[in-house]
Image (spheres, rainbow, N blue to C red):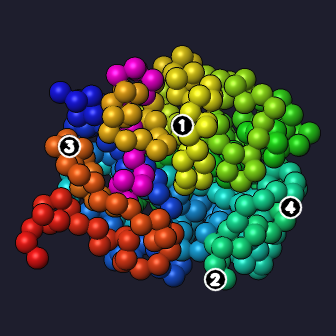
């Protein structure tokens, strides 16, 4: 039997395979950051019996968006739209975790309430782009978030988790990767604070720790997960001692008995491959030694490389992104070694049903016209 199709327990849930749908920013939410018919169909198509879906990054507070069209769960008005999504996944006997995030400095004032500056641990000039009504635009210079605001943000994650339960989600994943707010606090290239949220690694980890514990208080530790990008540089991220930082973070998260730790492998930068990063040491192979629970690995995997990382024991499940975009029936295709649809990168972010819900299943693609 393929390693990808051996059963595994994720938190309290028995999964029949290890092909995970990665969290994918697609920017198709309706007005008010509410999931609509397109999103319901999209997730329903990709649900499978005994399979795990991790939702796209979902905004935790009004000032947390980096991309127009991203969904939210910072208001009760957004619950019902997500309930339709989770009902569709559960109808297929699948499971779905909600990924919660705050973009932090990876935003533009057009996306901020009242046109305000985005928040960040420190006001440091950086590159990167946000998506607004004007398309892809440079990020707006950020302002330093106050300690009081950090406490409010922790509460936002807790409140969003309560809404997630009302919306029918099976668990919560905190997005602490890809240059967003948690990541900005963790790495000293973006965090120059001198208070209790800056300086030492322990202090830089404090915001993520407090938010994770707040979410655990709502849903239980076995239904909470964290995503990290130990070698990620997207959004001008950097740290002077990444190995020391992420070993510390991994060890601390291991103490919390989470459902899983989600690690992005170094060969992917943004949404493109960078093979030169394959040998970077700060990845699942290293962090596996410091984490006692389940690990999901993500980042440019193909069937053979997914099998390899599972066989090596560096990960327990593998998340697929771009292949899940273009293959709604990806687990079935991988199990049967069927050919995959090609993805169309130009339709990844924003738009309509094209490149979103119009990719055929294998059986449909083989049917006579």
Question: In this picture, which residue range is highlighted in magenta?
Answer: 311-325
Q: Which residue is mark 1?
A: 265
* Label annotation for residue 143: 4
Single out the mark in the foreground, 1 or 2: 1
Single out the mark in the foreground, 1 or 4: 1
Q: Position of residue 74 (x, y in %)?
A: 57, 65
Q: Which residue is mark 2?
A: 133
Residue drawn at x 23%, y 52% as measured from the top left: 339
- CB within 8 Å, label 1 to label 2: no
- Viewer-side residue, 312 vs 84: 312
**From what the image shows, is residue 96 above or below residue 12?**
below
Badge 1, how many Cα within 10 Å: few under 14, some, many 20+? many
SS category of the residue bearing label 1? loop
The alpha-carbon separation of the residues under discs 1 and 2 comes to 32 Å
Query: Reading the chain from its start, which is encountered first: label 3 or label 2?
Result: 2
Q: Quadrant of residue 36?
A: bottom left
Residue drawn at x 52%, y 28% as measured from the top left: 284
- Viewer-side residue, 176 vs 238: 238
The alpha-carbon separation of the residues under discs 3 and 1 comes to 24 Å
SS category of the residue bearing label 4? strand
Tell me, yes or no, if residue 255 can be seen here.
Answer: no
- Viewer-side residue, 85 vs 107: 107
Residue drawn at x 37%, y 41% as measured from the top left: 302
Locate the C terminus and report the quarter of the image it occupies: bottom left
- CB within 8 Å, label 2 to label 4: no
* Label annotation for residue 337: 3
Q: Using residue 230 as the reference point, say whether residue 185 is left or right of it.
A: right
Badge 2, how many Cα within 10 Å: few under 14, some, many 20+? few
């Amino acid at each position: 039997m393929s390693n990808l199709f051996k059963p595994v327990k994720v938190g309290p849930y028995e999964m029949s395979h290890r092909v995970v749908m990665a969290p994918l920013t697609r920017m198709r939410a309706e007005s008010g950051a509410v999931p609509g018919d397109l999103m319901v169909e999209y997730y329903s198509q990709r649900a499978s019996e005994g399979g795990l879906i991790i939702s796209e990054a979902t905004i935790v507070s009004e000032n947390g968006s980096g991309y127009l069209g991203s969904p939210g769960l910072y208001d009760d008005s957004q619950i019902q739209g997500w309930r339709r999504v989770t009902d569709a996944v559960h109808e297929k006997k699948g499971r779905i975790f909600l990924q919660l995030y705050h973009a932090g400095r990876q935003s533009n004032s057009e996306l901020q309430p009242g046109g305000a500056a985005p928040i960040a641990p420190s006001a440091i000039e950086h590159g990167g782009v946000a998506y607004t009504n004007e398309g892809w635009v440079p990020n707006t210079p950020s302002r330093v978030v106050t300690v009081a605001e950090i406490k409010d943000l922790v509460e936002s994650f807790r409140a969003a988790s309560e809404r997630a339960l009302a919306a029918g989600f099976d668990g919560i994943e905190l997005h602490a990767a890809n240059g967003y707010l948690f990541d900005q606090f963790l790495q000293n290239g973006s965090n120059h604070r001198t208070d209790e949220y800056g300086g030492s690694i322990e202090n830089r980890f404090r915001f993520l720790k407090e938010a994770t514990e707040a979410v655990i208080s709502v849903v239980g530790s076995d239904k909470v997960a964290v995503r990290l990008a130990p070698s990620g540089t997207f959004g001008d991220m950097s740290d002077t001692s990444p190995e020391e930082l992420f070993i510390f973070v991994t060890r601390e998260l291991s103490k919390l008995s989470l459902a899983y730790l989600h690690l992005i492998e170094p060969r992917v930068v943004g949404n493109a491959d960078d093979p030169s990063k394959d040998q970077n040491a700060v990845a699942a192979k290293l962090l596996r030694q410091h984490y006692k629970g389940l690990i999901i690995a993500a980042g440019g995997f193909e069937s053979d490389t997914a099998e390899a990382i599972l066989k090596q024991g560096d990960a327990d499940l593998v998340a697929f992104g771009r292949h899940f975009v273009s293959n709604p029936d990806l687990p079935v295709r991988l199990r049967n070694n069927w050919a995959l649809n090609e993805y169309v990168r130009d339709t990844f972010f924003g738009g309509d049903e094209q490149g979103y819900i119009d990719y055929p299943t294998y059986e449909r693609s083989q049917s006579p016209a």
